[in-house]
Image (spheres, rainbow, N blue to C red):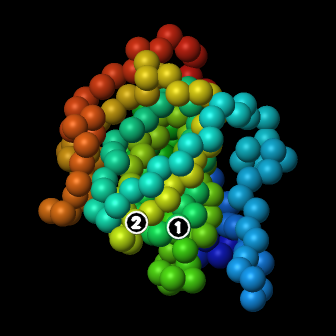
Amino acid sequence: MSVAIADRLDVNMTIFGVEIKQLNTFRDERGFFREIVRNSDPFFKDCDFGQWSHSKMQKSVVKAWHYHHVQIDWWYVAIGEIQVVLFDNRPESPTFKNKMVFKLGETELYGSETLEACVKIPPGVLHGCKVLSEQAHLFYITSMTYDPGEEGRIPYDSTLVGYDWGRDAIVADNDKRDIKPVSTRIPVF
């Protein structure tokens, strides 16, 4: 995690295996250029590439709690701002039950508390987000192609995490259910 990002996060609430790469933006009168991920990045190196996805969401949409048995996710918000919440649900982890809360998006529009970054989410870490701007575009890479039997879900309002998404939360039916992964693959920790 870069120094600039570490200064903006509660270091007592980090999660083992979660990595945040601060992105460099090169602006000029035409716009900007920003590199997101290289295959040689330490947090991406030696990982498999499975899928690249794009989620466009409206204000107050909440997607939570998802987790994976094997898959690694890398999140990046290209447009808008989201509140990201991560919860370490791995009993064997040295940061078991730690929670990370931070914003991803456009620093130029939403201020210095919003990170222009790419975050790596390891298997077993519950992850969720809420859109704070009028809309947000979340791009994410996964280490494998989507396998519904590998993904688990815990209801967005679960007391396990104890996070209040607010009264205005817009939530899909899938995020109100408890779904256990059925994968027999060996987890990567």
Point out the tag, 1 or 2, that comes first from the N-terminus: 1
- Disc assigned to residue 103: none
Q: Residue at x 34, y 61 (%)?
A: 58
Residue 138 in sight in this render: yes
Q: Is residue 182 left or right of residue 173?
A: right
Measure the C-alpha gap from mark 1 to mark 2.
Answer: 8 Å
Secondary structure state at the residue bearing disc 2:
strand
Marks 2 and 1: in contact by CB < 8 Å? yes
Image x and y of residue 93, in percent: 51, 37
**Where residue 136 sits: x, y (%)?**
45, 63
In percent of width and height, residue 97 lies at 38, 45
Q: Amino acid at mark 2?
A: Gln
Quadrant (top left/top right/bottom left/bottom right) for the N terminus: bottom right
Q: Mark number for residue 135?
A: 2
Farthest-out residue, front: 30
Residue closest to the eye, 13 or 8: 8
Quadrant of image for the C terminus: top right
Residue positioned most to the top: 184
User: Looking at the image, how many numbered discs can be counted on the residues?
Assistant: 2
Q: Is residue 175 toward the left or the right of residue 10 in the image?
A: left
Residue 144 image position (x, y, % from top left) = 62, 28
Q: Residue furthest right?
A: 40
Q: Disc 1 designates what residue?
A: 79
Residue drawn at x 70%, y 34% is 49
Q: Residue at x 51, y 74 (%)?
A: 114
Q: Is residue 17 visible?
A: no
Q: Amino acid at mark 1?
A: Ile
Rendering quarter of residue 82? bottom left
At label 2, counting other C-alpha atoms closer than 10 Å, the crowd grade (few under 14, some 14-19, many 20 or more) is some
Mark 1: secondary structure: strand
